[in-house]
Image (cartoon, coloured by chain):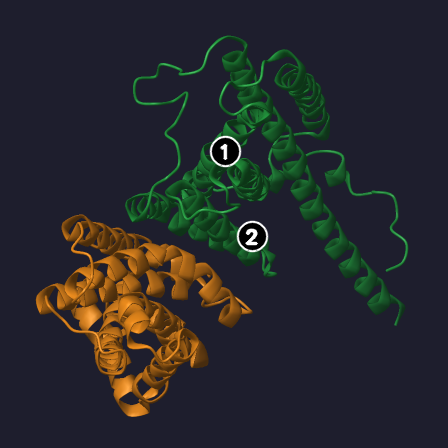
Chain colours: A orange, B green
Amino acid sequence: MWRDALLVGGKDLRIEARSRVALAQIAPFGMIVLVLFAFALGPDQSPLVHAAPGLFWVAVLFSTVLAVQRSVAVEAGDATRDGLRLAGLDPAGIFLGKAAAVGAQLLVLQAVLAAGVLLLFGARVVHPWLLLGTCLAGAVGLAASGTLYGALSAGVRLRETLLPFLLLPVVAPVLLAGTRLWQSSLAGGAPDAGASWMRLLLVFDAVYVALGVVVFGPLTEAA
Amino acid sequence: MTTIAPPADPRLAEGAPATGPDGSARLRATLWTLGVLGAVSTGATVWLGIWVTPPDKVQGNLVRLVYLHPGVAWVALYLAFGLAALASLLYLWPRTRSLVWDRLAAAAVEVGVVFTACTLISGSIWGRPTWGVWWAWDARLTSTAVLLVLFLGYLALRRVPAEPHVRARRSAFAALFAAVDVPIVHFSVLWWRTLHQGATVLNPTLSPEIHGSMAWTLLLGIVALTVDFAWMLVVRYRIGLLEDRLGAEELDRAIDARRAEGGAA
């Protein structure tokens, strides 16, 4: 299973390295979202600093939808999905590999967006490790749930419009927990119950990773 | 296709193999029983709630919403979506795989979405005079709204045309993915903010905090709405069953028509 995961994840990342869709299209899209938020909230620094954690995570969620759609599109042509199955790969491995590739791209996107938030909005970090841990846990949860929903919508006509509708409410807890944890790790935010939010985020990760490992096989079998 | 001939297909009269043993006669009898029970109990709740019970000392006539709101919420949040999740699991389990469960899940979600919307609307009507706002970002309101969106997504997925078993499988997985999210959404939103009053009847000590005729009316309201839900569920199930049979029959007829064309040529 781990070997298959490495193979599939490596393949997706290689495709990304050659096509640069995430870096050249999705990351700029995320930055545009940040700039649009700044336009919407006005040029004053204080509301922007105050809203920075939430805006960061909303931008990450939107980018997740795009990254997942890209991850599905990679398998859409030339009956690649059947090819993966015929190659005798473990479905759980395929799931872990695809989720890991999406997660790795999300981490890069988060790094770009975080730099944008810190530079454009003038937010200041006081707990860098909490910030990093939140990004990591958030990326795992978003990648796992996104890959599941991506597989669910893979064979569906109209999937471009359906996927955000299905995925975004499901990842609402990641937005809530991520925003709260970022508020605690940025200067001027309320130092609130960080531990329970982190636990919630980890539970979300565990639930969707476990669900993916168990159901990815039957999910992709005949869909 | 302008005229539809009377049903010559025997499957329209008797249960088709793929659609389970429920004959139309039994369904109709169930519908009648549930309908009469629902009408009587709902009528009794309305009578008790509006004319018999006294107004509340603090909330005045506004308290009468309490005979409706908890019942609607119970049906929507626990009964309908619990049933949908269970039916989806039963469909996914290979030994119990049958379109019966798929239709049941679809019916439960569809009726549940209506009840969830009614929960939000009745809560809103109560919230405007009590809290001063139509909507507050309170934990229960917010998680109910997220639940509504989750299951609207399920219905949107169902609307995408596909083979019955492909659609059933897809929908069942979607219901499963959404159902595991419900407790997480619940806790996240609970910690996010809370303003709603605690549970009145099913509070941790299980000692009802309201008394006499009001308590009985509240309980009767819950029973009435549960029966109403069951009636709507069976109606919706039956519509789904008939739709599926009609689809199969029209396909057969189309195939026969093409065959006849081939024979004539």
Left or right: A193 in relation to B2 = left
- Please, what is the three-letter code of the amino acid marked with disc 2? Leu
Residue at (46%, 43%) from the top-left corner? B88
> Badge 1 is on which residue?
B73
Residue at (50%, 35%) from the top-left corner? B130
Are the residues under badges 2 and 1 in a single subunit? yes
Q: Is residue A89 above or below residue A194?
A: below
> Badge 2 is on which residue?
B155
Subunit ID for the residue under disc 2:
B
Residue B25 appearing in the image: yes
Say which quarter of the image contains residue A111.
bottom left
Q: Position of residue B116 (x, y in %)?
A: 53, 41
Q: Quadrant of the N terminus of chain B?
A: bottom right
Residue at (52%, 37%) from the top-left corner? B123
| For marks 2 and 1 on the same chain, the one whose residue lies earlier in the sequence | 1
Say which quarter of the image contains residue A57.
bottom left
